[in-house]
Amino acid sequence: METHPAATTAPPPPPPDPTLDLLTNCLMKHGKKSDAQKMVHNILSLLQESTHLPPQPLLRQSILLASPSIKILSMRKSAKTILTPRALNERQRTRQGIAWILKAAEKGRKGGVPRDQRIAKEVLAVLEGQSEVFKWLEDVHKVGYLNRSNMNVR
């Protein structure tokens, strides 16, 4: 019983990882999950080529670094709007970190660079501490710190 030669050359799929699944779902457009999975695979390949390290821990670390721990809600109280910080659970934090990395990667869109390359570059920038994601993270935490007295307002 012989196997087809093309079947043996494909790399094995990465082990199931909730962070990768969430990244895949955030990248997915118009319900085309297979295209998003290919893009995640390309991102992981680009990370491995550029760093010569295992790509999944790098990706997880960059998402963790880019993730805020709170969100800011605008609430109406009488005639004024007050800002209230709320804690995020782990999945919400991860989702927001992914969204910010994707948003920061969109700035290179006009240069004609493919999306997966832009995202891989942004992941590396986050790991190096040179991404604009850190400015957004600092802004959210600063607003939360300034409005911490409004935490009990509902």
Image (tube, grey):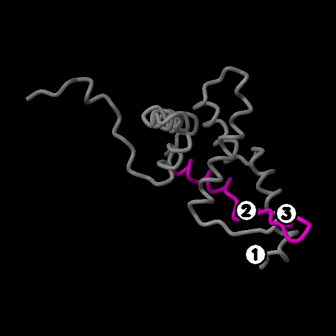
Q: Is residue 78 magenta?
A: yes
Residue 23: say if magenta. no
Q: Residue at x 39, y 51 (%)?
A: 16
**What amino acid is labelled 1 in the image?**
Arg
Q: Secondary structure at mark 1?
A: loop
Q: Which is more N-terminal, label 1 or label 2? A: 2
Q: Amino acid at mark 2?
A: Lys
Residue to which mark 1 is pinned: 154
Instruction: Indicate the secondary structure of the residue bearing disc 3.
Output: helix
Distance in Å between CA atoms under marks 3 and 2: 10 Å
Farthest bottom residue in view: 152
Badge 2 crowding class, 10 Å Cα cut-off, few under 14, some 14 to 19, many 20 or more, is: some
Q: CA distance from mark 3 to mark 1?
A: 18 Å
Residue at image x 65%, y 66%?
A: 88
Q: Which residues are magenta?
A: 57-83
Q: Where 150 falls versus 138 (above or below)?
A: below
- Across and down, in percent, residue 129 comes to 74, 48
Viewed as shown, does residue 68 lie left or right of 74? left
Q: CA distance from mark 2 to mark 1?
A: 15 Å
Residue on which disc 2 sits: 71
Residue holding disc 3: 143
